[in-house]
Image: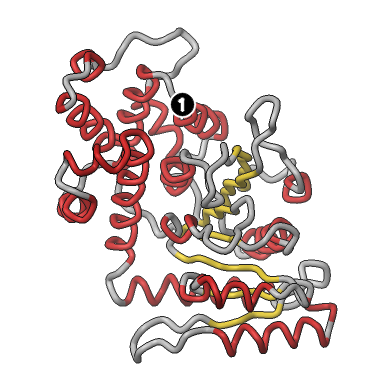
Amino acid sequence: MIPEAPAYWPDPAALADAVALRDRGAIAAALNLLDDRRQEARVRASVLMNRLAARPSSGAHVIGITGPPGSGKSSLSSALIGVWREAGRTVGVLAVDPSSPRTGGALLGDRIRMLRPDDDAVFIRSLASRGELGGLSPEAGPMSLVMLAAFDVVVVETVGIGQSEVDVAELADTTCCVVQPASGDAVQFLKSGIMEVPDLFVVSKADLGVLAERTARELKGAIPRKPEGEWAANVTLVSATTGTGVAELARGFDAHRAWLDAGGQLGDRRRRHQARWILKRLREEFGVHGIERLGGGDGLIKELLRERVPPLTRHEELRKRILSLYGSPEGERT
């Protein structure tokens, strides 16, 4: 049963229908609902996500763009938006920023350069990382599914990664890592194992010439060899300032999406991402012991992969199960 809500809250089923029609007000309201951590909001958000999940699957593509701070992620995103819009594709952006130490909200940073006030086919939402070490906000997963229902391309840009922060690869269909010339990032990535994660690599600021070309060679030499038939990551030299390589990179994203489709991997990848999102959220709330009460992480992932239940609904069901095992009064109320 949907709990009674304040008058300003829209009906979640009607909201889902409006999101699918790319109504900007509805998209903003849906994202705000997902950002609301109150119990009544969680229930209504589940109804919203169930309604969206029941709609026919679209050909939308979720692209993750990550890389160290200052590598040019926002400039690259802006340039890519231009290419996609020229092709007639709609674009939604989830830009994860550092949290404000005062309010906990997003520090908008370079988002202003992505804004296109006269283009209703582009929607940009900034959200705070809230201290997450993986470069993503906890809400980024469900929010990307809302955007997926409304736009042809969904870009999730992280706050910036360190040597182990690669959560975006557990959300996106295709992950792109941006490296700036002469930064030494290629060596650090090789040490940490990050080289095995992205599907595409970008060396930004290609207008620097020799420095950019040298960094591209370093990256190419560090990419692990893949068995025949697996996707082999490539390196693209890009300049957001001059436009060099941006269209080529956009074609690289399309090629990876086509490869996923051809191998029937896209649906499996998305289900695995959602299962891991549920596991991570439960582990953060209840710890390793709570997960063990459900049979352990590996067993839970296998269980989730066999199902077709939207992630918010399944997450709430598993929360209630853990709480009931602990005899929590909250488990009885929710």
- Lateral position of residue 101 relative to residue 227, left or right: right
Q: Residue drawn at (56%, 51%), measured in percent from left and top?
A: 135
- Vertical arrangement, residue 223 with respect to residue 176, above or below: below
In the displayed structure image, the side of residue 267 where residue 128 appears, left or right: right
Report the side of 21 relative to 307 (left or right).
right
Label 1 crowd bin: few (<14), some (14–19), many (20+), radius 10 Å: many
> Is residue 174 in view from this perspective?
yes
Q: Which residue is mark 1?
A: 33
Q: Which residue appears at 27% of the width and 31% of the height?
A: 316
Would residue 235 appear left or right of 280 to someone viewing this image? Answer: right
The three-letter code of the residue at mark 1 reads Leu
Is residue 285 shown above or below 79?
above
Q: Residue at x 69, y 33 (%)?
A: 100
What residue is drawn where x is 55% and y is 83%? 234
Q: What is the quadrant of the C terminus in the image? A: top left
Residue 310 lies in quadrant: top left
**Is residue 54 visible to us here?**
no
Quarter in which the N terminus is drawn: top left
Q: Which is nearer the eye, 120 or 188?
A: 188
Q: Where is residue 283 drawn, in percent x and y? A: 33, 41
Q: Which is nearer the eye, 213 or 241?
A: 213
Quarter assignment of residue 290: top left
Image height of 219 relative to 93, above or below: below
Say which of 36 and 261 sits in front.
36
Which image quarter: residue 306? bottom left
